[in-house]
Amino acid sequence: MPSVDYAIAVIGGNFAQFRAYCNPPGTNQLWATLHDAASCTGVSAVSTARISAGDNPGGGGYWEYFTRYMCHFDTTALPDKPITSAILKLYSSSAVFDTLSCTPSLDVVGHTATPANYDYTNYALVQSTLFGSKAKADWNSSGWNEITLNADGRAAIVPGGYTPIALRISYDRLNSPPSWGAYKGAAFQFVGRDSTPGPILSITYTTISVQTDPATEISSLSARLNGTLLDDGDDTPVQCGFQWGKTVTYNNAVSVGNVTESSTFSVVIGNNLEPGQTYHFRAFAVGASGAIVYGADRTFIASNSSADTRVTSIIRYFSAGPDPVYQMEILRGGVGGVYIPPTLTKKPYSTEDTTAPVSNWMNLTSADYSKWISTHTLKEMKAIFGKQPTFTEWAMWKVGGGSK
Amino acid sequence: MKTIDADLLAAQINGYPSAHVKQPYIRCAFTLGSSSYDYSYIPGASTNRITALQHKEVFSDNPTETATIVLRNNDLLVPNLSGYYVDLEYGLKTSAGNKSELANRLWVIGQQEVSKSKILSGKADIKVYVSLQGGWDVLFEQLCLIGNPPFYRDESGVLRDKTVYQCLEYLIETTLSLATADTWTLDALAVDDGVINTLIPWPTGADWNLINANSLDSNDENAGFESIGKVIMRLMGMTSCYLRVLPDMHFEVVYPQSTDAVDETYYSSLADGHVFYENTETKSYTRPNHIIVYGNDADDWANYARGDAYSTDFDNMPYAVIGIETASALTTESECDALAKAYLDKYKSAAFSGRTVVPMDFRVELFDKIAVLDARGS
């Protein structure tokens, strides 16, 4: 699979710093003042960046500062293909320190500044969704530090454009103040701009391409999902399948095995769909390298009654006879014409003499159970119970007990 | 879907006293004035009279609610119950005693007394079969006698300039209550399909002969007075709503919509939820699949307004099946479109049908939306 490194764009890369001077000296600023500041002073473009929070050990009284880093990577040459991995590389030339003992991490996030117009005074441009992070303990103070971007980070990459990446310390991202202490601080330092080696975004993408085709054979309970493997990306064998569910979070997945390039594939799902329910699905393909590619989302509606039809008849049955019944027949739809006349499952006849006390109304016996077992196949039993039922399980079903 | 007593729901779900035991409790007291006969089915009692019962609520072109109750009468103590009413309650024995859910009121319209001997024991088998009917049947029995004799038109204008809902309110709370010397109530409107409380079927200036229009025309094959139920069904047909009978002689307007959540789900496997024993699904195309409503008959339809509605499966049909309705009082295309949609909704609901047999579920009521999940087969 192709893997390409991208440097920050010349127009990107900057250093923004907020300084809050205390007055009178010795009084710390509130955390909110630091975190939510809408403006800053001391903006400059520098060759190195420092992401830090804490008390400045300099003279002249206390002051706290906060630094957030924004840049754009020039990904204009990146083709619009599924990205399988992305690693942010930061070169450090000096030590990380943490005299606050707050064990911070350096967090990668996005930002909304444009390449042509950075507004250094507006920290609200820096976002909070975590793309990846590097713990202080893992920070290489003299060399490359690699941070693997997660799915959100990969999704933020802009093929054919400029990719915004920002950095902030974990306490800042979470808006959770560390315990302050005089002349204490925590910082990560790396080469930010105008010096080499600057930040690098290393992107690996795949040319595997899979297409989600419309569902067919849609019934009330099942449907056939279809897809096509357009390109195997020379990453064979490629295993294909589908994700499906009631929402675009899917929640279900089914694999159909290895598929060759330019071939269609399909699978029948369901037997437990809800009539009238809208289902989302998408094809997926997994290359030998582990690269996963998804087709576009599609939907189908499980056909049949319940979407628009309602209960139009209720027939309640009770019989205290030798084959006792306490059940109901529900008819749906048919309003205005196509109406199914009720078919009686149990006629209201009984020869039971109910003068005798009936403590357990349905007094099922092992003989009843044996008779039922002998007249049903194992497959029929599995359809209801998943196995051959015990007497108690069968009796529960018979009286409708245990129904959720 | 009814919200039922927690103990009753627990017994319905879990059984009582164990999961494989359910003990029915059916409250059944026949009442006429101060006279009352309590023939309730009590779990464990030695004096139960009900040996069987069938109670049908059926909504169709001619809605009806009927019941047959079979009573043991070997002691010959069951009197003539004709004219009595009963408010049946269905329930179970629960951890908190017998709990039940009230059903619609039913009136005894007749009974049969059957006597035979049991072949083996030689004992007398004497039973009374009580036939009952409900609110819809009363509506269809009572003629829509409004206005002045001979009641063939609404010349006093009691329905004039009323919306569909207001017409229903008058017909149920005034006309029906007067006819039966009882108190019937239409619950306050809690839904709106854009028609039921907007459309005025008989505005000022409209043809007042629409009520019992052909009652005095001996040459008309449709001659005869309309019942209150028939007029109500005609009115409901103009809307996407339905009328539901409630206990205590109340009626309620409901507006089912495809976006409504499923009220109850039944499963083929007990392990998944409330089990069903048997299920049938039938599907057919919506017919008619194209409804046209013409409105504004001023100037002899020279400047008519037209509304259209198409079924979603219109393209699947080999040909169009057109249904045409007229609504002279409507003057705009949007009004006619809304009415066309209302008519189509009724036809759409007729395109599907199904039948499901389940253990007694005390939550279900007419126009609930249910789903059936069948894992049988491979």
Image: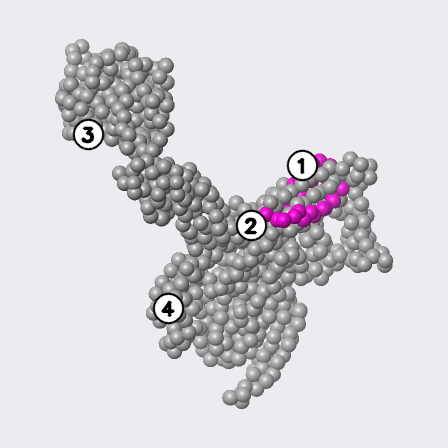
Q: CA distance from mark 2 to mark 3?
A: 55 Å
Horizontal and vertical percent position of residue B240: 62, 47
Q: CA distance from mark 2 to mark 4?
A: 36 Å
State which region is magenta: B316-344
Residue flagged by tag 4: what amino acid is it? Leu
Q: Which numbered disc flags the more N-terminal residue, 2 or 4?
A: 2
Residue B334 on the magenta span: yes
Q: Are marks 2 and 3 on the same chain?
A: yes
Please, what secondary structure does the residue beneath circle 1 have?
A: helix
Chain for numbered disc 3: A
Q: Secondary structure at mark 2?
A: loop
- Compute the Cα span from label 4 to label 1: 59 Å
**Circle 1 crowding by C-alpha within 10 Å: few under 14, some 14–19, many from 20:** some
Say which residue label 1 marks.
Answer: B334
What residue did someone put label 4 on? A378
- For disc 3, the marked residue is A135
- Relative to residue A107, is residue B349 depicted above or below? below
Residue at 41 percent of width and 41 percent of height: A228
Per the image, label 4 sits on a secondary structure element best described as: helix
Label 2, on which residue?
A308
